[in-house]
Amino acid sequence: MCKKRIGILIVLMIVTAFLSGCGASGGEKNQTSSETESTENNFVIVTSFYPMYIATINVTKEIPSVEVINMTKPQTGCLHDYQLTPQDLITIEGADAFVVNGAGMETFLGDVLASQDGLNIIEASKGIELIKDPSGEDNPHVWVSISDSIIQVRNIADQLSLADPKNAMQYKINAEAYIVKLEALKEKMHNSLQNLNSRDIVTFHESFPYFAKEFNLNIADVIEREPGTTPSPKEIEETIKSVKESGVRALFAEPQYSQKAAETIANETGAKIFTLDPGVTGEATENAYDDYLNIMENNLKSLEEALK
Ligand SMILES: [Zn+2]
C-alpha cells in the first residue's frame, strides 16, 4: 500500500505539473478526495465511465460493504478524447478495484495503472472477439451489443469475485439476475427486428458495429468517422453521395453529439433523422440500475419507427 501511495504521488505530481493552467476539460469530478478514501471495511470499486458503472452497480446491488464510484461524470460520454485529471488519480488511488471496458476505450490511462500495486483491474471486455474499425484499430464499443454486454457483466462478476472473495456468491447471484433481464430484452429485440423493410442505417460515430452485428443491421455509412472530430465538408459531401447512392432512408444521430451534420445530410438527401443511443450518458442515481435496458428499449422503438 505504501509503495502504491508513493507511486501515485509521483504520477500525480507529474500530471499536475502538465495540467495546471491548461484548463483541462471534461474532467470534473463527482466526488471529493475524502469521499473516495477506502475505509477498513468497504471494498471501493471505481468504474471508468457510465456503461461500466451501470453494469457494476447491478453486479454489486445491495452489498453494503461495496461502494461504486464512477470516475468520469455520467455526462462525459465516450472516452475517446478524455484526459486524465489529478482528481482521477486520487480517485483511482482510493480504489480496491477499477472496472474498465478495455478494447482500447481507456487509452487515456497510459501507464498509470502499471504503477498501481494492489489495484485489481477488472477488464470487462476480456475474451470478447473485437471488431476492427476501417482504420484497422479495435472498435471499443463492445457494450452496445446486448450479447457482449452480458459477457461483460459475467466478466465483471467473475473478476470481482476473485478480488473480493467474501462477496463472490452475491456478485454471481446479482449478475445472473441482471442477465435474465438482458436476455429477455435481447430476445424481444430480435423478434421485433426480424422483419424490417430495410436493414441499412447511417450512424453518427463508430459506436454501433457490435449492435449492428447482433441485430443483423447494415451500417451503410458513418457521419463522424474520427470520434470527437467534426466531420469535414468533404466527409459530409461523401456521406451525402453514399446515402443517395444506397437509398438509405434513416440517419441515426446520437444524443451526445450535435445533430448539425446529420441535418445537413438529411436536407440534401431527404433521409430522416432518428436517434440511437450508445448508452454512454445518463444520471447516476438510484434509478440507474435499468438505464441500459431503458436506453435499448428506446433504441428498439427508434429502429422500428425508422425501418419498418
Ligand atoms: Zn464512442
Image (tube, helix red, strand yellow):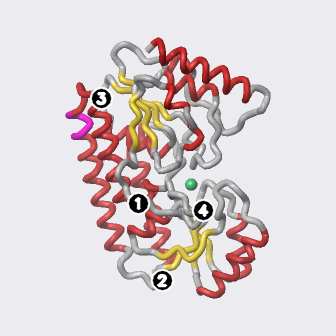
Q: Is residue 202 above or below residue 71?
A: below
Please tell me whether mark 4 or mark 3 is closer to you in this view.
4
Counting residues from the start of the chain, the first of labels 4 and 3 encountered is 3
Would you name the residue on which mark 4 appears? 205
Front-lying residue, 133 or 100 = 133
- Identify residue type, mark 3: Ile
Residue contact between numbered discs 1 and 3, judged by CB atoms under 8 Å: no
> From mark 1 to mark 3, how far is it between C-alphas?
27 Å
Q: Earlier in the sequence, mark 1 or mark 4?
A: 1
Which label sits on residue 145? 1
In the rendered image, the quadrant that contains the N terminus is: top left
Q: CA distance from mark 4 to mark 2?
A: 20 Å
Q: Which residue position is annotated with label 3? A: 63
Q: Which residue is mark 2?
A: 198
Looking at the image, do the residues carrying marks 4 and 2 touch, with CB atoms under 8 Å apart? no
Residue neighbourhood size for the residue with mark 4, other residues' Cα within 10 Å, grouped as few (<14), some (14–19), many (≥20) = many
